[in-house]
Amino acid sequence: MTQNTITRREFIKGSLSLLGAVSIGRVVDLSHLPNPAPEQETLPQAVAAKGSDLHTPAEILETALDGLGGIKRFVKSGQVVAIKPNATWAFAPHTASSTDPDLLRALIEQVKEAGASRIIVMDHCSVEPGTAQALKANLLGTVVEETGVEGLFPDRYLAPKETYTTIELPQGHAFKKIGVIKAAVEADVRINMGLAKSHSVTRMTLSLKHMMGFLQSPSGLHTNLHKGIADINTPSQIKADLHILEALYIRTAYGDYVTCGGPETVETNPYVVKRRNQIIAGVDPVLIDAYACSTFYDINPAELAHLKNAADWGIGDLEIEAAKTSGKFKIFNVGEVPVKEPEAVPTEELSTKPDDQPGELRTNPTGIPLPEVEVPSNTPIQIAASPNCQTAANPNTLLDKALIPASLVLVGAGLVASRKKPKSNAPDNKDQPFDE
């Protein structure tokens, strides 16, 4: 017997052994296993993008959005997008009073590139001196005009009633219904652009509280503020699809001086306005606010009643350190390219054919010739094995089909191939993942 031959006894013995191994895959029911998760489910819930004084708001924003998978994760071609900046304060940029105009401009450009059919920038300007003065001083009105998008800024209590509508808050605890800007409800996508600031009542105003700008009467929430803030972040018709918390400049309390807006800058009062060059973004506003509390203000997030309520009610995750460890929260520096998950390498595919035709095995070239087998045309080859079991071709010339079952023919091919395989310097591809 030469090196490349095999006796009938050896063939049957080896085939039975291999058949037993393959049979294991047949008796294990894999139908209960979930399909591979889509890409966006593996992405973080929130990210922080860190820049420096040399980086523009657009660069820091791009880093944050790239870390989340890109703006197209949230905005699809043809959609109507509502963007809610903080536009209510009549103070100049870099006072950490209103949204940075360059940041708003950068986001509008990103949303345009994603293919939005309509963009509406909106906020309820509920404080003095009113909308016109605020939009002129903070330059957000200029951005809206220059970018050609729509602007909707209800002025305190002067807007017509048709500007608003009433929505249900099915999971609300203090509020079950509430009046909101109608255009926010009608939009396909809502983006909440909060700003990290101190606050005289809630201590901090961050992503969760910033949602009050969608309301018809923001002051009405003050009857039960800490529960109300959490309520408007529960699933509803105004739930934000993306939160962007600006921390390019932040406003902090200085002794008894606590305000959401003012003329101070880093140069005039560095105790009140501080430069941090960060943007935090994601789909979990609780996680975003928790990071801001601990990073910028050295505050335990659980000390903020509205933030604790939101976490307790399942709106988001309060445990920032655990989120960093698990990958739910990630930090990127500007210029740092997020690492994408490796893609599976295709190996073999079994084509689907009618029941009266045999299956066709399509493989990548291996350089190993396999013997052909004659299979009756009315006998389909059905393979019910684990996805990790590769199918094999059948040797015809070595077998007497009247004596050996067809199942042994299939499994035994691996033994034949291994005995006939010549020595080769070709790389071993056994570690390549299967295309599932």
Image (cartoon, grey):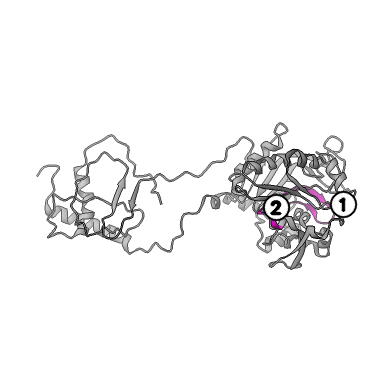
N-term-proximal mark, 2 vs 1: 1
Mark 2: amino acid: Ala
Q: Which residues are magenta?
A: 185-208
Measure how far apart labels 2 and 1 are at the Cα level: 27 Å
Mark 1: amino acid: Val
Horizontal side of 300 relative to 407 (left or right) equals right
Image location of residue 274, percent across then percent down:
79, 40
Image location of residue 77, percent across then percent down:
60, 47
Is residue 218 visible in the rendered image? The answer is yes
Q: Residue at x 75, y 67 (%)?
A: 177
Magenta run includes residue 310: no
- In this rendering, the answer to whether 40 lies above or below 110 is below
Outermost left residue: 1
Q: Residue at x 83, y 65 (%)?
A: 223
Residue sitting nearer the eye, 302 or 184: 184
Q: Of helix, strand and loop, which one carries label 2?
A: helix
How many marks the image carries: the answer is 2
Q: Residue at x 73, y 63 (%)?
A: 231
- Number of the label disc, if any, that sits on residue 127: 1
Horizontal side of 393 relative to 1 (left or right) equals right
Residue 248, by quadrant, is: top right
- Number of the label disc, if any, that sits on residue 290: 2
Residue sitting nearer the eye, 14 or 191: 191
- In this rendering, the answer to whether 295 lies above or below 235 is above
Residue 430, by quadrant, is: top left
2 and 1 marks in contact (CB < 8 Å) = no
- Label 2 or label 1, whichever lies nearer to me, is 1
Outermost right residue: 129
